[in-house]
Amino acid sequence: MTEPRDRLVVADNPEQSRFEGRLDDRVVALSEYKLPRPGVITFLHTEVDPEFEGQGIGSVLASNVLDQVRARDLRVVARCPFIGAYIRRHREYADLLLHTSLGRTEDEAAT
């Protein structure tokens, strides 16, 4: 039997400004965003249905979302703590972070 994380389908739902992770027809995870200017995506909030927490669903969602962002040639502002932590743990996505003219990420500049 396959694990739920292996069956997760991640797709953008631009009408609701969020990426959704679905198992069959059920949304079990989501990552909300805004597009503040061309070429930039700001992640605001990520959540996983409590029934599926601790099963790797959030990580599958994050990696799929960031792969889609890379394919669209967008830069990331990670206001969402989960997405920010995921990028810190998976440095292969660090190049997606938007940097200010001072060389800091936009998140660092805001603090």
Image (cartoon, grey):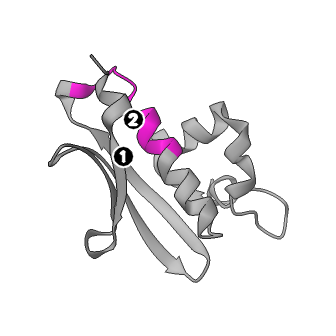
Q: Which residue is mark 1?
A: 46
Packing grade of label 2 (10 A; few <14, some 14-19, many >=20) is many
100 relative to 67 in the view: left or right:
right
The reply to whether dot 1 and dot 2 touch (C-beta < 8 Å) is yes
| Residue 92 in the figure: left or right of residue 71 | right
Q: Is residue 20 one of those drawn in magenta?
A: no
For the record, the magenta segment spans 52-63
Secondary element at tag 1: strand
Report how far apart the C-alphas of labels 1 and 2 lie in the structure.
8 Å
x 78%, y 56%: residue: 104
Q: Nearer the viewer, mark 1 or mark 2?
A: 2
53, 81: nearer the viewer: 53
Query: Residue 15 occupies which quadrant of the picture?
Result: bottom left
Q: Is residue 43 above or below residue 60?
A: below
Residue drawn at point x = 72 percent, y = 41 percent: 92
Give the image location of residue 52, x and y in percent: 24, 27
Looking at the picture, which amino acid does disc 1 mark? Thr
Q: How many marks?
A: 2
Residue that badge 2 annotates: 58
The quarter of the picture where residue 1 lies is top left
